[in-house]
Image (tube, grey):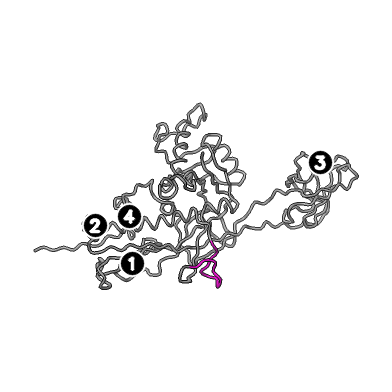
Amino acid sequence: MAQYSKAYFSSIANLDTRSILERMLNVRPDDFTFADTMRLFGRFMPETQTTGHYFVDTPLFAVSTVTAATDNSAGSGTDWDLTLDSADHGIIQGHLLKFPSGDVGYVKTVSGDTINVISLDGSTGITVAANDKVVILSQASGEGSPGVSPRRTAPKRYEYVMQIFKAAREITDIQLGSTIEFEYNGTRYVHNMVEDELYLELMSYVSMGLLYNPGTQNNFTTSTPTLTDADGRPVTVTRGLHDWVLNGGGINLGSGLTIDLAFFANLTKALNRAGAQGEYMFLGGDDTMIPLDDTLKALNGTVLTNARLSVDGRELDFTLDRFRIYNRSYTKKRLALYSLPTHFDFTGASNHSKDFFVIPMDSVPTSGSATRLPRISVVYLKVPFEQGGTHRSWSADYAISLIRTGALAPDGPTNHEQVFRMDVTTRCGLRVLGVEHFAVGSVA
């Protein structure tokens, strides 16, 4: 009698085979999690440490605020001592400063947070008061003068920490009947759908954590961890994008927003002020994507002269994935997690279902590195094994490991317990570089 064997198919080991994965997991491309999206965009990157530090250049100039103003010219306003809100103002002798009144003054001396400013002609007064904003306009040096005082623009320090994400499933000899068989490339496979549930559970943990975790210090490398589990083991929580943007210096667009042309005009101005580039991802749920689609569908030659948006020569439709407006391109990505009634979309929830993120998709040079890195990426530690063993699988990028144990394990029994247990693990975190280029908001 003819006999044949069936190999076990691991969906985790075949994450790079999208055609099979989508059929096995019954997940459409628009349902992929935030972590899956980062992987598809090549933003899932290996690192060798659980924490990393990067220094990113900051703007060359800063706006300073006057905290005190003393007129040394008996009321004529031609000679001022100004105290600024910080000694890190970047102003040096010879700078020309522009004031809200429109007046321009010459910086004669600088001492810490105090600068002496005089009028250019010695007679026209400068109008300035406490709380005025001061900007550097230009620089003028005297004839035969030595070199000016050196300026230093301090880069901003960014840090990522990794979090250990785990999930597990255990099924008995009765539950083991929920398997499926299929053939691929001439080979017959057997697969248990519980593994798919396990993978989706893990990716849910990862994705929601990368978006909304508040973050901790790297407790893996300190003798005084701030968070431990029930057995006293250190636990590290990676900082999520929401906290990064709101509390790390990103652009907070506010709440109760309406997605229309005025919104995109304000967004464009905010991104341009930050010196942002032209390639972005617009990330959100149904509450954001529906009005976004409605706005884009309404664009035509009357509203946007000579810039009619179309796909394959047709007007924009509901399935639009990419658009360009005000000299900036956006890839539209819907996240299904915002519609989950078990997390965000239910009465009494934290209202995150209305959130959206505007994420830069360019790269940035980091100090001390010869390479450019994405402004946003998910970094991970590779699994500690890359070969050998019949009871384990891993994703093609070695980011996720799966261990199969029990007497019913498809690779052979590991003990006498009549169960099939699956444990899946990934160690990853969110890396953000140049948070001032990111924006967050929520719709009405």
| Residue situated furthest left in the rendering | 1
Mark 1 in CB contact with mark 4 (< 8 angstroms): no
Q: CA distance from mark 3 to mark 2?
A: 80 Å
The residue closer to the viewer here, 349 or 370, is: 349
The residue closer to the viewer here, 76 or 312, is: 76
Q: Which residue is mark 2?
A: 178
Kind of residue sitting beneath label 3: Thr
Side of 158 relative to 281 (left or right): right
User: Does the magenta-highlighted stretch encompass residue 225?
Assistant: yes
* Image location (x, y in percent) of residue 38: 44, 53
Q: CA distance from mark 2 to mark 1?
A: 19 Å
Foreground tag (2 vs 4): 2
Magenta residues?
216-228
Asked if residue 263 is positioned above or below residue 130 in the image, the reply reads: above
Disc nearer the start of the sequence (2/4)? 4
Per the picture, the main secondary structure of the magenta-coloured stretch is: loop
Foreground tag (3 vs 2): 2
Disc nearer the start of the sequence (2/1)? 2
Q: Which residue is mark 4?
A: 17
Residue 427: assigned label:
none
Kind of residue sitting beneath label 1: Ile
Q: CA distance from mark 2 to mark 4?
A: 23 Å
Q: Which element type, helix, strand or loop, lies under badge 2? A: loop
Q: Which residue is mark 1?
A: 403
* Image location (x, y in percent) of residue 44: 44, 57
